[in-house]
Image: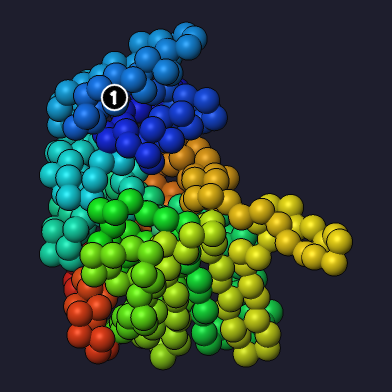
């Protein structure tokens, strides 16, 4: 396979971004087709990409399942809404199509586990989950530092995750499933172990979004070894996009996410710009994620978070949503990995 022919299902904010990325920044891949529940949006995107050959023939496919089945599509990027993922992932597995699936893998742990089992039955990994922070150079450097053992064993993570604003449709549960899920993955990845318990507490909510949305949220994750991670997620922070992570280890700590943008000191003041959203802050991570997914897919592999990682995150978020309403710690019900994957 010399050039990977890619189809994208769902071209809202993230899918449209990935379409541009595949066309303009990714080598060894070619965007063949897009689909979206909003046909007009898909057509507008295809027209926008039609600036010059060879991309002036990106076609719009009405049904995402037809896009997945198409003979001229080798691999799929799923950026459709989370509730559509399960059906589309099963279709990818049925057709043997490698897929880069935006998070969440699916909406609940039970369906995510069915996806893991179906992929395992096929005997090869076709699913990679879009936890793009693993490709961010700062997170990557932090992971390497912690793994080197230079700071001793890692004991704690403190995380901050703030969006400037989110659409009004963003409910309290989505703060767990769509935003906090990134820290769930970061904690599992940096510690290299599973989260066994989660507590989500809700401080006084911001008055700037009404309708009972519990924002910000504070969560504590407990990991199998007894290590812990905390995170403040505040998705209507108003100022800009901010993601920080401090790892505390036996012989020191390391922080990332302090220095995005130009930091100035002048006229008795210091400061810098804040990115408006995650597409700017994590642009390099998304670029690397897609390029490495394309390269690995051509080799017949995945290179990043697996279906199991997507399932484990879904199981933690499900427990987190339960804790969101009770405020109490909830144990994570995770299937036995060795029994499922052998
Ligand atoms: C969004 O869907 C993302 O995935 C961003 O990375 C996250 O920071 C944001 O809170 C989510 O809404």
The C terminus, quarter of image:
bottom left
On-image quarter of the N terminus? top left
The image quarter in which residue 93 lies: top left
Determine the secondary structure under disc 1: helix
Above/below status of 197 relative to 268: below
Residue on which disc 1 sits: 42
Q: Considering depth in this image, is 311 or 317 the residue closer to the camera?
A: 317
Res. 144 image quadrant: bottom right
Q: Which residue is at a point 48% across and 32% down the rendered structure image?
A: 21
Residue 138 lies left or right of residue 216; in this view the side is right
Can you say whether 318 is above or below 49 in the image?
below
Q: Is 206 left, or right, of 71 in this rendering?
A: right
Residue displayed at 26% across by 34% down = 9
Label 1 neighbourhood size at 10 Å, few (<14), some (14-19), many (20+)?
Answer: many
Which residue is at 60% across, 85% downward?
A: 249
The spot of residue 283 in percent (x, y) is 54, 44
Q: Nearer the viewer, residue 177 or 305?
A: 177
Horizontal side of 212 relative to 185 (left or right) equals left
Left or right placement of residue 140 versus residue 216 in this view: right
Ligand 1 quadrant assignment = bottom left
* Residue 332, picture quadrant: bottom left
Q: Position of residue 20 (x, y in %)?
A: 46, 29
């Amino acid at each position: 396979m010399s050039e990977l022919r890619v189809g994208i299902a769902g071209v809202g904010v993230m899918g449209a971004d990935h379409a541009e990325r595949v066309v303009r920044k990714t080598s060894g891949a070619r965007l063949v087709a897009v689909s979206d529940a909003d046909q007009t949006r898909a057509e507008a995107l295809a027209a926008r990409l039609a600036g010059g050959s060879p991309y002036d023939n990106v076609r719009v496919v009405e049904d995402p399942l037809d896009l997945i089945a198409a003979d001229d599509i080798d691999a799929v990027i799923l950026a459709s809404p989370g509730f559509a993922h399960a059906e589309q992932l099963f279709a990818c597995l049925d057709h043997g199509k490698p897929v880069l699936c935006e998070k969440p893998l699916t909406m609940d742990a039970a369906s995510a586990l069915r996806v893991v089992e179906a992929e395992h039955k096929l005997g090869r990994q076709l699913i990679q989950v879009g936890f793009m922070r693993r490709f961010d150079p700062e997170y990557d450097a932090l992971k390497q530092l912690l793994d080197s053992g230079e700071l001793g064993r890692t004991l704690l993570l403190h995380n901050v995750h703030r969006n400037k604003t989110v659409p009004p449709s963003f409910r309290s549960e989505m703060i767990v499933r769509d935003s906090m899920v990134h820290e769930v993955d970061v904690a599992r990845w940096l510690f290299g172990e599973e989260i066994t318990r989660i507590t989500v507490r809700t401080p006084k909510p911001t008055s700037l979004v009404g309708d009972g949305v519990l924002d910000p949220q504070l969560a504590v994750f407990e990991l199998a070894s007894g290590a812990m991670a905390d995170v403040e997620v505040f998705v209507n922070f108003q100022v800009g996009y901010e993601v920080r992570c401090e790892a505390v280890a036996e012989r020191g700590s390391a922080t990332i996410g302090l220095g995005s943008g130009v930091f100035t000191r002048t006229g008795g003041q210091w400061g810098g710009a804040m990115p408006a959203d995650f597409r700017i802050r994590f642009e390099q991570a998304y670029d690397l994620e897609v390029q490495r997914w394309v390269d690995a897919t051509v080799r017949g592999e995945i290179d990043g978070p697996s279906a199991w990682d997507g399932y484990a995150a879904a199981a933690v978020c499900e427990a987190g949503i339960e804790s969101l309403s009770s405020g109490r710690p909830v144990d994570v019900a995770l299937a036995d990995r060795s029994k499922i994957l052998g």
